[in-house]
Image: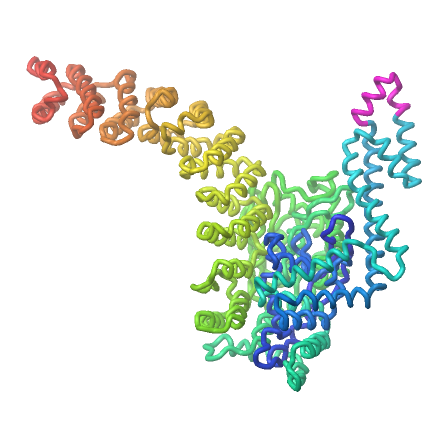
Amino acid sequence: MIVKKRAIFQIPISLICLSSLLQAEVSPTQLQGMSTCMEQGYEHYSPAQGALYWSAAIIRNTLEFRNNVAPLAQLARELFFLHHDKGTFDITRSATKIAFYYTPKDIGRIIGYLHQYKQNASEAINDLIERIKKEKTNEIKAAIIKTLNKAIGRQTKILLELIDTIIAQGMWDSKKQSISKAGKKLDIEWQRIAENIGKARDQRNWKKILSIIQGHPLEGQFTRVFAIMSKNQMALEKESKESGLIAFEHFHKDAHDFTSIITQAYEHEPLITTGFLLAWLWKYANTKDAFIEYLQELDLTIAKPGEHIFNMQRIAAQPFSYEDFKKLNTQLTNPIKQLPSLEELIFYYYGYKLYMAQLPEPISTSVGIKSICQEVFSDCGETALRNFFNALLYDPLTQTFDVELLKKLHAYQPIIDFYTTYPTTEHVYNPESRNDWARVVSGLPNVRYNIENKCEISSKKSGCENTQKVIQNLLPGIDSFATLAQQLGQFGIMMKIEGTPSDNPCRLSLYITKPHQAEFKIEWKFFNDNFLVEYPEQKPPEDTYITLTLSDRIDKETPPFKRWESILLLSLFIQDPMILPSNASPSEYINILLLLPTHTPIKKIAWTKHITQLLKDNPDLESELKPILLNIYTTLPKDEDYIRSFAESIMIKYHALFETQIALLKTTHDPLSIACFTQKILSSDILHQSNPEHVQQLFGWILDNIDKIEHTETVTILESILHIQFSEKNLKQPYIQKLLQWCTDSLKDIEPIHVAPVLDDIVDLTIPVNEDSLPFITKLHDWFIQILKPIHRLTRLKYINNTIRYGLQDDSKLPQRKLLIDKIIKEIAPLSPYDRSSIARRIIEAEIPSSDLGKKTLQELYTWLFENLNNLPKDQLGDIIRQLRQKQPQLKEIVPQDQWDRIKSL
């Protein structure tokens, strides 16, 4: 039986929290008969649709990313729950939500009412909810009271911990000042204050404590927790007093809101609304009986007299078996004339994980982890380690973790105990298992931690080497990945390592082969601020024939229900935007994007590209898509892929993205990320956007952060600045002048090995020449001359000749180059006779410009040439004079006659 991960959840309301009940969904083998039991015209109400929606990513992505005001997002939050760790995903377990008290019969009634009355189903659904409240009053009251008690207990614990922290920290500054002004002794007064706090704590006199700790840095947090606890206590007192009546206001409000939420959702997306309800049913059910109850109630609600919407005999069929999976696997990995039924396709999808998957589902990072320290923390490093051990120990045949392998490796007893307590994947997301795992890897010797030197494995400096220290504690005698590979080899497990553990940041690729299993690859990434272990994507193999057949069915004229069902199925097997039909509407495109997997950063980044393009093409979807983009970027680890993806989005000239971009830029503190974003902004045409306020904010961010960029990145930034197409209007902006100032100030930091590209860019400078730019251009040219003087004569000569060659071209760069040519002629000295000869030939070869400025520049060059004829090598002078005479007819406007007279004297 497949057991899904369950966990303890936080209720998403301001007053209370609630622990969930662990519940396993029905085994996918029970899918036999769940779609084929439905009569024609009612297929979209099949329980198998619930398995399809739950398997697809649409509900989870809706919860995590979609705008809260969207009707489907509101419905998802009523029916389901996604913990902020992004790992715990379940039907709602909140005692304040009416869906917590639904049964399969209630789902049958709600779907029946929507089928009968469409958007006018509010009255019938309201009556149902009132009936549930009346029939389950005592159950609801008991659940609310239990929830409030637990919440108050947690909040009391938080207050006590805050008090302990306050006492441990001693006298705070504002209190010291007031005592000193009063002329009292600090140590005596602190002893008295601490005693008073202790007495008030023992008496649970929170108001007294608040009056004592005024001005303390923790006063605000203490006040907030106390205020929430006080409201919960009042609600608890009221609930306990009211007999036979539900007093808790939040429950009544949520129950009332549910009706409007579901009718609005049905109006916008009837198929998906029904799918969400059926997904709740699939996750709720433990046995097939629940589906029969649902179908019987739905049948009573909508079936015509003397008819039924489902066949009882078919739904009561025997479960699927491994033999059924093998037959499907043979059938679907060969050309298909006709697709099997929905129930068989979903079973095939689940069957791969059940019978063939090599790895368990990966765990994502969580926050609020409680270990052996007072402070809670994020378990980034801890989770990466656990995913590694899970992959190493997982036995797909038994769907358990191999504790015996740990014993063979003489593992640390706490890790053996951990996998003995949690031998299956059932509780991998359970907060208790997370906390227990954190305790296993906390407080180990020679390991660097971020908190109290014993909690939250540190990724700073070398996260990879630090992780190896953890492994050395967990597996004594194994001091590196290489040593671990050797040890595993003794037990028939091969582990090949690619990457260098001493690198920082570091990426390791671990290729693991277990007995009787194919090789799989794990990517372990160690960054300066986080760890990440990525599993290979696990999906049914050789699914080409399924995807081709489904794609063909989507493209054909099919009813909306069948079209959307095919898209949902295709998302399971292909997991790629190829599922987008050519005639999809923008709203359908959004729902299709929500089907795509986002469980890894790479997949989220792929998401952003599609959403960004959709936003550019459909500006009217701004309110829907902007929150999705912001949610994605704020949940991504700041690695190279993130930087590249976000930097690309900065280059998109679309105002709807700006708020998202600037908000994320302000959270960026890593020098490498700052350099990358700065370079992307400067290399885009951002200066020519229509919104000057946006441009100013972006350049303001650059100026605030540019000094944090490491010197090794300075040349890249300088090059980007020198390539900008400045307008005269741009140059008058104070932020541009400051940027140009940074540019010239940074020239001194360029290492000799990196000067060449900057010299080239100065030769090719495009900035307009005016009073605003002249100081900048002059400083660049001064630096250019300063660099050229001491370098090798051939290199110097190359830059002089290039400046002359390009400097006479009739284009927008001519004014800047003339200034440079003037400076070269006057300041590049001394030149050898052969250098002068090379420059003379370059001048003679130059085409005559058509512009007045170009002609003037060439005239000054010829003046220099004739003045230096006597300084040319004797063995080359005759050839140069011959070239001059050949070109004399073309130079009438350039070279005056008195210059030609000089040749006669030679």
Which coloring applies here? rainbow
Q: Main secondary structure of the magenta part?
A: helix
Quadrant where the N terminus is found in the figure: bottom right
State left or right for residue 288 relative to residue 246: left
Q: Residue at x 26, y 29 (%)?
A: 802
Q: Tell which of 71 and 477 is nearer to you.
A: 71
State left or right for residue 726 relative to residue 548: left
Q: Which residues are magenta?
A: 172-189
Quadrant where the C terminus is found in the figure: top left
Q: Position of residue 366 (x, y in %)?
A: 68, 50
Q: Position of residue 134 (x, y in %)?
A: 81, 66
Q: Tell which of 140 and 209 is nearer to you.
A: 140
Q: Position of residue 188 (x, y in %)?
A: 91, 23
Q: Is residue 228 magenta?
A: no
Q: Quadrant of residue 185?
A: top right
Q: Tell which of 669 and 493 is nearer to you.
A: 669
Q: Position of residue 160 (x, y in %)?
A: 85, 41
Residue 101 in view (yes/no): yes
Q: Residue at x 16, y 28 (%)?
A: 848
